[in-house]
């Protein structure tokens, strides 16, 4: 077998030597355009997991590499004058130069014919080989030549970064946030040899320009960085080795092989350096490729096997790297977090480490964090000896104290008749209240008959409904210490629909009613058109909301949430997609929020002063032409000024064409942004299904309360069963509950 | 988990007698459905016609399109065909719909490929109305792996049908379908269906060759997809168990060869894996 390897980096060298080791009869030639001793990086990092694979692949090489390692287990974050440390983040670093020397030496021992300082003259020579391994890096010439076949995408980011070395040797991985007059700079430093460390400086493009770095020479940039991080360099210099400002490019390929040419390492894929996985992925590629060649006789089968095995791993790493890259690009979003919370957010940024992951790595850090969180939540200066996890740290919303931070909501289609909550409402409410939720939210309760989405929705437009809800709330209060909140809404143009069993937004075939919205636009093309609210309608709707709020107060609800999201009536005013008014209630964001704020004020006045008021708000319409981020943040701030204590962050559904994405806690980043920019507490849901996910969202300061998805109720169900078992020996309570039930049914 | 078996209607050269014999054997076995693929630009049978043939030869087993590329068809005519098949088979139709992966199918049908998602959304609205009119709605599943596909499941369908892949990929897609469902405010949970290819025993090599041919349009992915075909009894047993573990309710096992003994081989796998017998 005749093999040509292009590129003498870790991927190419390792593939070449493993191939010779597996097939001593193979003729392996490696071409590298740089001289043997030249390298332009400083240190490389490995996670512990990689090492097992390396040991199996070639024990000799593995021992030499491990001998050259500098290991660290801790991670320091320097943020706003504080230094925080977490243990258990085991990594090993080594000099890229030393790694290459080991691989070169081993390749020579195994009979790889390596030619350095040699450019590939002509791609036509590919025909002389059975296999061409293109490990020629992020700017791969080979990949470029067959770009159509590989389906390459290159996503170049705007942030600027530069790699330096330094003789300063920190004990541990060190991450520094440095706020300056030009913007926020970040420094990352880790040791890789006895007397050398890597030091990466990164900043947003605008900060880079403001600081004049776009015009600075290599030396000027180095001196600038040295001054900026003088405190952390402790008198040591930064060292340059062709260290120039770069922009990171994420490379993806639809496929990694074409005929007998296969891509390896950075040529095939890149992942942002902040998760330190480039060298690891490259060397794992080499191992997988040689294993595939051993397993399959036919080259096409082997290359397919290689790609099939590696693609999911690489895609997962790239997804995590993208999260990390996004985090670093939006650093400003986190600057107002308390240092510990900033640290927690940093540790969990890529989605690969959760709250439990942090705890397993460093229980003392997690305990310390929990104590801080609980103390901060309690607003006390008294240090706590033991503290619950964030989920069980009581929350305060206005004057309301909620015993834990899991919120459960009643499902839809519970079968109310004439807006009266019935047996299904009672069962669902009690199940959730007894199941351990700190706060149970009702389904969306209509303020008027024509404000219902479907004829089965509950309402609060009459005294009879107020009495029915009062009985339910009393029962929940009697049986648990959960707070109970009501969500008040008006469906607007999404009203008069069939029940949701067979889909949503299907207009009623019989017994529909006239719809109202900010403008006379149907929810979906060809659907029934609403009438635009006139001045009189607006007053009537406002009064309906206020009357319902008064009834909700009388019914004993602990919290009221006003629904301004999901394209319902109030939401239809907020989005430019649905509000085309020209009467002072449409136009710019201030005009669009005018009517919803009028309603908020009326509701605030009608709702007991000491009880908290929440607003459900769309963070995005998930549709082109929808509310901008600036609009949403301006609205959130205005809500805060008008007496809103909590924003329930939702997204989409503004129009039938709204399209979101449904990854793990997919609304948390929106919540995080609103919470940071508007300085207001948030409640967020959206694929939060376990206590670990709740804790991860809370600990990172992404929200203050979490709405848990129902399929994740298993653990709550278990507690509900236990409580139900306990309740059977308390006949007095049961009797009270039955009488409450009888009241609600009457 | 229930297990369905695909009709060999997308394997070139299969005759009607084989389709009917296959359906009869499946009806006798532990299978919960007979499933049919849809493709225009390939030597295969139309799924609704193939399922009609199977319907005439069976009386118990469900008849599922997995999946029907609805945008290629006129909506009114499709609604009529679906209603006919459902009624004539004794209400055994399960309707899985999707966008397909081939642009040439759209070219042949004269349908704008770029608007396919919108077309399907509107079709689902129209089909739901037609089912309502008739008074019976077959189980309606929507497929796909993109965010709009999950939103479509939540807005219009009764459940999700995954396009195939390792159990981990199914679990990840199912979690997204569930999240979209809750986000849209649907009550209950979506039905979750999966699909996989098999060719057991000595037929495995022929099966792999078929897979490469059927998926040739995906270029290098054909190898990947072919490598995912279940070729041994043990691999199939492990796969069924892993899918059940991942939350799949109904797995459609699509044949890569039309040998009749494959039905018995698969029946044995279903029993051995401890799956629900229909």
Image: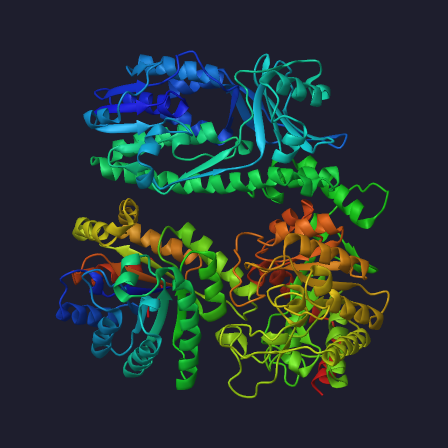
Quarter of the image with the C terminus of chain B is bottom left
For the question of whether residue A743 can be seen, the reply is: yes
Its colouring scheme is: rainbow
The residue located at (81%, 49%) in the rendering is: A378
Please give left or right for residue A307 compared with residue B20 in the image: right
**Location of residue B145 in the rendering, given as x and y in whole percent from the top left corner:** 42, 56
| Quarter occupied by residue B158 | bottom left
Direction front: furthest residue: A582
Quarter occupied by the N terminus of chain B: bottom left
Query: x, y percentage for residue B41?
Result: 23, 60
Above or below, comparing residue A678 to residue B3 in the picture: above
Q: Quadrant of residue B96?
A: bottom left
Q: Residue B64, located in which quarter of the rendered image?
A: bottom left
Question: Looking at the picture, how far across and down is residue A443, in whole percent?
Answer: 65, 71
Q: Give the left or right position of residue A715, taking residue B115 as reference.
A: right
Name the spot of residue A498 as percent of width and height, x first.
53, 80
Nearest the viewer among A639 and A688 is A639
Vertical order, A556 against A28 (above or below): below
Residue visible at 56% across and 78% down in the picture: A529
Residue in view at x 52 percent, y 41 percent: A322
In this orientation, does residue B32 appear? no
Q: Is residue B81 above or below residue A377?
A: below
- All told, the count of numbered labels is 0
Q: Residue at x 61, y 50 (%)?
A: A693
Q: Nearer the viewer, residue B17 or A371?
A: B17
- Depth order, front residue of A54/A335: A335
* A599 to the left or right of A332: right
- The correct choice, above or below, for B202 with respect to A342 in the image is below
């Amino acid at each position: 077998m005749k093999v040509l390897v292009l590129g003498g980096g870790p991927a190419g060298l390792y593939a070449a030597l493993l191939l010779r080791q597996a097939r001593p009869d193979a003729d392996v030639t490696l071409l590298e355009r740089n001289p043997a001793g030249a390298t332009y990086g400083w240190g490389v990092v490995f996670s512990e997991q990689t090492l097992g694979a390396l040991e199996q692949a070639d024990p000799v090489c593995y021992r030499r590499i491990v001998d050259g390692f500098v290991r660290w287990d801790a991670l320091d974050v320097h943020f706003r004058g504080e230094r925080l440390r977490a243990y258990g983040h085991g990594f090993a670093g080594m000099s890229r130069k030393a790694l290459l020397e080991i691989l070169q030496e081993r390749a020579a021992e195994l009979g790889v014919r390596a030619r350095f300082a040699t450019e590939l003259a002509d791609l036509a020579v590919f025909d002389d080989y059975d296999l061409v391994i293109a490990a020629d890096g992020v700017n791969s010439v080979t990949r470029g030549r067959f770009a159509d076949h590989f389906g390459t995408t290159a996503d170049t980011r705007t942030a600027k970064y530069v790699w330096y070395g330094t003789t300063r040797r920190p004990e541990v991985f060190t991450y520094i946030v440095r706020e300056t007059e030009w913007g926020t700079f970040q420094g990352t430093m880790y040791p890789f040899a006895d007397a050398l460390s890597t030091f990466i400086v990164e900043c947003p493009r605008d900060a880079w320009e403001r600081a004049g770095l776009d015009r600075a020479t290599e030396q000027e940039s180095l001196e600038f960085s040295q001054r900026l991080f003088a405190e952390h360099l402790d008198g040591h210099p930064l060292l340059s080795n062709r260290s120039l400002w770069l922009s990171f490019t994420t490379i993806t390929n639809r496929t990694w092989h074409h005929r007998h040419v296969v891509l390896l390492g950075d040529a095939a894929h890149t992942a942002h350096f902040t998760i330190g996985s480039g060298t690891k992925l490259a060397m794992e590629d080499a191992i997988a490729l040689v294993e595939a060649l051993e397993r399959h006789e036919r080259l096409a089968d082997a290359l397919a096997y290689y790609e099939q095995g590696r693609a999911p791993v690489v895609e997962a790493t790239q997804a995590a790297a993208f999260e990390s890259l996004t985090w670093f690009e939006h650093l400003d979003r986190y600057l107002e977090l308390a240092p510990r919370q900033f640290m927690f957010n940093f540790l969990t940024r890529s989605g690969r480490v959760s709250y439990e992951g942090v705890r397993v790595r460093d229980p003392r850090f997690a305990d310390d964090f929990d104590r801080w969180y609980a103390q901060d939540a309690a607003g006390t200066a008294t240090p706590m000896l033991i503290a619950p996890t964030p989920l069980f740290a009581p929350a305060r919303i206005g004057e309301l104290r909620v015993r834990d931070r899991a919120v459960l909501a009643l499902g839809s289609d519970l079968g109310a008749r004439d807006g009266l909550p019935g047996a299904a409402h009672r069962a669902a409410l009690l199940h959730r209240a007894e199941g351990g939720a700190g706060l149970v939210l009702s389904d969306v309760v209509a303020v008027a008959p024509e404000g219902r989405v479907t004829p089965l929705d509950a309402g609060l437009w009459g005294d009879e409904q107020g009495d029915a809800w009062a009985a339910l709330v009393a029962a929940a209060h009697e049986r648990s210490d959960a707070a109970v909140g009501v969500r008040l809404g008006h469906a607007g143009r999404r009203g008069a629909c069939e029940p949701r069993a067979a889909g949503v937004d299907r207009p009623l075939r019989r017994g529909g009613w006239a719809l109202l919205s900010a403008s006379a636009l149907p929810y979906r093309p060809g659907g029934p058109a609403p009438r635009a609210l006139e001045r009189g309608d607006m007053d009537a709707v406002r009064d309906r909301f206020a009357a319902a709020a008064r009834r909700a107060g009388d019914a004993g609800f602990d919290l009221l949430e006003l629904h301004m999201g999901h394209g319902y009536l109030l939401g239809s005013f907020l989005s430019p997609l649905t509000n085309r008014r020209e009467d002072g209630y449409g136009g710019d964001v201030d005009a669009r929020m005018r009517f919803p704020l009028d309603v908020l004020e009326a509701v605030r006045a009608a709702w007991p002063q000491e009880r908290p008021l929440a607003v459900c708000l769309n963070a995005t319409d998930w549709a082109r032409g929808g509310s901008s981020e600036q609009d949403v943040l301006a609205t959130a701030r205005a809500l805060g000024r008008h007496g809103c204590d909590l924003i329930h962050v939702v997204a989409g559904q503004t129009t039938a064409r709204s399209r979101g994405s449904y990854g793990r806690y997919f609304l948390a980043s929106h919540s995080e942004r609103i919470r940071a920019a508007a300085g207001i507490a948030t409640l967020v849901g959206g694929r939060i299904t376990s206590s670990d996910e709740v804790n991860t969202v809370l600990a990172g300061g992404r929200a203050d309360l979490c709405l848990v998805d129902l399929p994740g109720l298993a653990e709550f169900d278990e507690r509900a069963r236990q409580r139900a078992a306990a309740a059977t020996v308390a006949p007095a309570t049961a009797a009270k509950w039955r009488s409450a039930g009888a009241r609600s049914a009457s | 988990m229930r297990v369905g078996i695909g009709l060999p209607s997308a394997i070139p050269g299969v005759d009607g007698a084989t389709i009917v014999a296959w359906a009869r054997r499946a009806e006798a076995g532990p299978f919960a459905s007979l499933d049919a693929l849809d493709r225009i630009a390939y030597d295969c049978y139309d799924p609704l016609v193939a399922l009609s043939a199977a319907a005439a030869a069976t009386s118990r087993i469900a008849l599922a399109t997995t999946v029907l590329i609805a945008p290629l068809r006129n909506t009114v005519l499709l609604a009529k065909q679906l209603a006919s098949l459902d009624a004539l088979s004794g209400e055994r139709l399960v309707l899985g719909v999707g966008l397909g992966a081939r642009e040439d199918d759209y070219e042949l049908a004269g349908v704008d490929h770029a608007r396919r998602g919108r077309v399907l959304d509107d079709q689902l609205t129209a089909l739901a109305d037609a089912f309502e009119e008739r008074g019976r709605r077959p189980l309606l599943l929507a497929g796909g792996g993109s965010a709009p596909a999950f939103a479509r499941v939540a807005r219009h369908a009764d459940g999700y049908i995954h396009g195939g892949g390792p159990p981990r990929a199914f679990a990840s897609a199912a979690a997204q379908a569930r999240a979209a469902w809750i986000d849209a405010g649907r009550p209950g949970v979506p039905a979750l269906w999966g699909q996989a290819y098999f060719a057991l025993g000595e037929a495995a090599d022929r099966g792999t060759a078929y897979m490469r041919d059927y998926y040739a349009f995906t270029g290098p992915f054909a190898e990947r997809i072919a490598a995912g075909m279940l070729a041994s009894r043990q691999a199939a047993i492990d796969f069924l168990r892993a899918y059940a573990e991942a939350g799949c309710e109904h797995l459609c096992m699509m044949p890569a060869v039309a040998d009749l003994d494959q039905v018995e081989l698969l029946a044995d796998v279903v029993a051995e894996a401890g799956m629900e017998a229909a």
